[in-house]
């Protein structure tokens, strides 16, 4: 039996996908080859896209997009397919940068990929973007709130924000204008009070998880950055728009600390996934095939 030209071309795409290692984002490329089967810890970003795409204009002509922690570029590609003029994807890990570059070429779209971390990018870029995608990244940041504040300033129209959450989802009490030290400490100590949990060691085996918020802190954090939440299409996903513009102050010199877990400085700056972790993830692909 002779192979059709398409199946030969698809075999070649499938080989390139495999050569790009372990993909966090599993999705279908235009030729029908997929980057994986959605097995955890990877996932299908299409599921998340379906939740917030009703809040994305169908025509993004003339618009600019920033996609922080964009991984293999699924969301940037969707925004380009909706006609966005320019899409900047920020991703510190070289492995994911190569995947994003490959995936964008497969879709025939042009994405500007910045191989850097969100902290450095947001503290050194004074541009603003119409739409900002900030999904699955907040809890990976050691300084999440300064990045969120920068993101709020950078957002001209809409922000798509997702974070892993811990804790109760019960309604917090109505906020008081002032909490009296001592007298009101039990209110602040309530598990339903807005809070973020600091993880010094590992969470889910991942040394890039730092702070996990409860739900009750998300809206206040966005509000205090000048954003108004307009929708919550999923427990962990918010759509927000600018309400107050606080502006920015630009200094010409910035010194960033190096930091990391397990005694290893891992941020800021471009880097590779921990080689041991990367190998384990690649090995898990053989197990998936055998399933
Ligand atoms: C949980 S994944 C989410 C990927 C994508 N945003 C999504 O929702 O499908 C986290 C992504 O953020 C990236 N990341 C981790 N630390 C980062 C940092 N300090 N700055 C920017 N991206 C980071 C990871 O490499 C990964 O691509």
Image: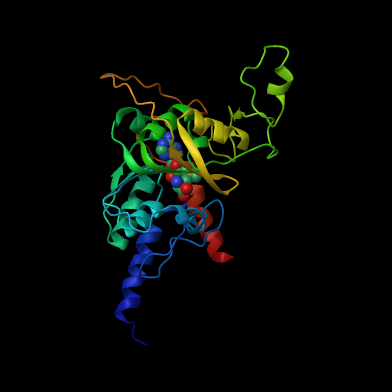
Residue 230 appears in view: yes
Residue 265 locus on image (x, y percent): 43, 27
Dividing the image into 4 quarters, which one contains the N terminus?
Answer: bottom left
Residue 128 occupies quadrant: top left
Whether residue 173 is situated above or below residue 102 in the rendered picture: above
Is residue 170 or residue 8 the one in the foreground? 170
Residue 114 locus on image (x, y percent): 30, 41
Residue drawn at point x = 57 percent, y = 39 percent: 205
Residue drawn at point x = 47 percent, y = 40 percent: 137
Whether residue 46 is situated above or below residue 252 in the rendered picture: below
Is residue 195 or residue 19 the one in the foreground? 195
Residue drawn at point x = 28 percent, y = 18 percent: 253
Residue drawn at point x = 55 percent, y = 35 percent: 219
Residue 209 locus on image (x, y percent): 53, 35
Q: Quadrant of ligand 1?
A: top left
Dividing the image into 4 quarters, which one contains the C terminus?
Answer: bottom right
């Amino acid at each position: 039996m002779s192979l059709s030209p398409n199946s030969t071309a698809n075999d070649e795409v499938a080989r390139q996908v495999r050569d790009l290692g372990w993909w966090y984002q599993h999705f279908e490329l235009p030729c029908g080859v997929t980057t994986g089967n959605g097995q955890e810890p990877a996932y299908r970003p299409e599921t998340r896209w379906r939740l917030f795409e009703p809040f994305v204009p169908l025509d993004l002509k003339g618009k600019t997009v920033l996609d922080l922690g964009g991984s293999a570029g699924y969301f940037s590609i969707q925004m380009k397919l909706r006609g966005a003029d320019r899409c900047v994807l920020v991703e510190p890990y070289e492995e994911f940068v190569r995947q994003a570059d490959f995936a964008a070429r497969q879709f025939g779209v042009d994405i500007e990929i910045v191989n850097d971390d969100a902290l450095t990018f947001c503290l050194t870029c004074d541009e603003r973007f119409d739409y900002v995608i900030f999904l699955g990244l907040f809890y990976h940041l050691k300084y999440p709130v300064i990045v969120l504040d920068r993101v709020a300033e950078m957002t001209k129209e809409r922000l798509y924000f997702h974070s892993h959450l811990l804790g109760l989802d019960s309604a917090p009490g109505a906020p008081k204008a002032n909490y009296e030290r001592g007298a009101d400490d039990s209110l602040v100590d309530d598990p339903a009070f807005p809070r973020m949990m600091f993880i010094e060691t590992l969470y889910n085996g991942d040394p890039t998880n730092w702070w996990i918020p409860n739900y009750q802190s998300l809206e206040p954090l966005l509000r205090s950055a000048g954003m108004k939440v307009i929708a919550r299409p999923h427990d962990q996903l918010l759509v927000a728009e600018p309400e107050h513009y606080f502006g920015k102050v630009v200094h010409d010199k910035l010194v960033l600390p190096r930091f990391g877990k397990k005694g290893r400085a891992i941020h800021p700056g471009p880097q590779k996934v921990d080689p041991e972790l990367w190998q384990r993830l690649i090995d898990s692909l053989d197990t998936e095939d055998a399933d």
